[in-house]
Image: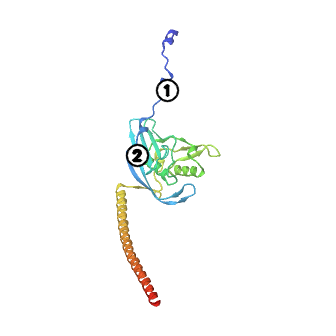
C-alpha cells in the first residue's frame, strides 16, 4: 500500500474502538423461568455458620439451546432476603463445537445459607442435566478462586462438595492458595447429593404443607377462643366475688358501728 493510500485510511476514534469489544452474551441476562421449593433440614448448630434451623428456599431454573451451545442457570432465592448476584447462582455451558462443558468462571459453590448441602445439590442437578444429552463431552479444567474460601473450614467444605461429585481438586502450592478443579468426561461425574440435608418439595407436597398449616392455625384459633371465653367467665366471676366481698365488708363495718353505738349509750 502506497503512502497516499495510508493517508486516506480512516482512523477509528477511541470511543468506537471501545464499542467494538465483544458484547455480553444475551443469555446471561435471563431470569429464572421454572421454580421449585427446596427443604433444608434442621441440623445441629455449627461453630462457623451458627444455627441451622429448618428452612425452605426457592430453586430457580432457566435453560437455552442453540446449534452451537446450550446454557443452564440455577439460582437460589430466600424469602424476604436479598443476596449478592454472585452468591446462590450457577451457570453451566455446553459447547457443541468443541464438545466440552464448562462451569461459570467463578465456580460459585458459595451459598447462603452456607453449610446446608446446597452446593452439592446444585452441582448434582447440573450433572444430571449435562449427562442427559452430553455425557461424552469433556469437562473444562478451571482455577478455584481463593476469594471464595474465606477460611479453612469454607475451603474444606468447597473441596468436599467438588470431590463428592467426581471432580479432582489439585493444589499448585504448599500453602494451598492456588488450586484447579478438573474432571474427565461428564459421564464420570456423580449426580447424587445428601438428601438428608436437601430435599425437593413437589407442588403436591407444598399444597399438603399449606393445608396442614391452615388446619393448625384454625385449631390454634379455636383453642384461643376457648381460652378467651374461659378468661371472660373467670373475669365475670371475679367481679361478682369482688362485689360480694365489698358488700360484706360494708355490712360488717355497719354492724361494728351499730354495736359500738349501743355499747356507748
> Quadrant of residue 30 in the image?
top left
Residue 184: percent from left, percent from top = 50, 44
| Residue at 42% from the left image edge and 54% from the top image edge | 38
Query: Which mark lies nearer to you, 1 or 2?
Result: 1
Q: Can residue 93 be seen in this snapshot?
A: yes
Q: Where is mark 1, residue-wise?
A: 18
Determine the CA span between mark 1 and mark 2: 33 Å
The tag earlier along the polypeptide, 1 or 2, is 1
| Residue at 55% from the left image edge and 49% from the top image edge | 159
Q: Where is mark 2, residue-wise?
A: 61
Q: How is the image coloured?
A: rainbow
Q: Nearer the viewer, residue 70 or 100?
A: 70
Q: Nearer the viewer, residue 173 or 74?
A: 74
For label 2, the SS is strand
Residue 162: percent from left, percent from top = 52, 49
Of all residues, the one furthest to the front in this rendering is 265
At label 2, counting other C-alpha atoms closer than 10 Å, the crowd grade (few under 14, some 14-19, many 20 or more) is some
Residue 219: percent from left, percent from top = 36, 66
Say above or below: 68 vs 174: above
Amino acid at each position: 500500500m502506497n503512502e497516499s493510500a495510508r493517508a486516506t485510511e480512516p482512523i477509528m476514534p477511541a470511543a468506537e474502538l471501545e464499542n467494538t469489544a465483544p458484547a455480553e452474551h444475551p443469555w446471561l441476562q435471563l431470569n429464572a423461568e421454572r421454580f421449585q421449593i427446596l427443604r433444608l433440614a434442621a441440623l445441629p448448630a455449627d461453630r462457623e455458620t451458627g444455627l441451622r434451623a429448618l428452612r425452605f428456599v426457592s430453586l430457580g431454573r432457566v435453560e437455552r439451546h442453540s446449534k452451537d451451545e446450550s446454557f443452564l442457570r440455577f439460582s437460589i432465592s430466600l424469602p424476604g432476603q436479598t443476596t449478592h448476584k454472585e452468591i446462590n447462582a450457577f451457570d453451566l455451558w455446553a459447547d457443541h463445537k468443541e464438545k466440552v462443558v464448562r462451569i461459570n468462571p467463578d465456580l460459585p459453590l458459595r451459598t447462603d445459607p452456607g453449610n446446608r448441602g446446597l452446593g452439592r445439590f446444585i452441582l448434582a442437578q447440573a450433572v444430571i442435566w449435562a449427562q442427559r444429552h452430553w455425557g461424552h463431552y469433556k469437562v473444562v479444567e478451571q482455577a478455584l478462586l481463593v476469594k471464595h474460601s474465606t477460611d479453612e473450614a469454607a475451603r474444606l467444605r468447597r473441596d468436599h462438595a467438588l470431590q463428592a461429585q467426581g471432580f479432582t481438586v489439585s493444589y499448585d502450592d504448599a500453602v494451598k492458595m492456588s488450586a484447579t478443579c478438573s474432571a474427565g468426561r461428564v459421564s464420570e461425574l456423580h449426580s447424587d447429593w445428601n438428601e438428608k440435608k436437601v430435599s425437593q418439595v413437589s407442588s403436591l407436597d407444598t399444597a399438603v404443607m399449606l393445608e396442614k398449616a391452615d388446619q393448625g392455625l384454625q385449631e390454634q384459633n379455636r383453642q384461643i377462643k376457648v381460652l378467651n371465653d374461659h378468661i371472660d367467665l373467670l373475669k365475670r366471676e371475679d367481679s361478682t366475688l369482688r362485689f360480694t366481698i365489698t358488700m360484706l365488708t360494708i355490712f360488717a363495718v355497719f354492724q361494728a358501728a351499730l354495736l359500738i353505738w349501743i355499747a356507748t349509750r
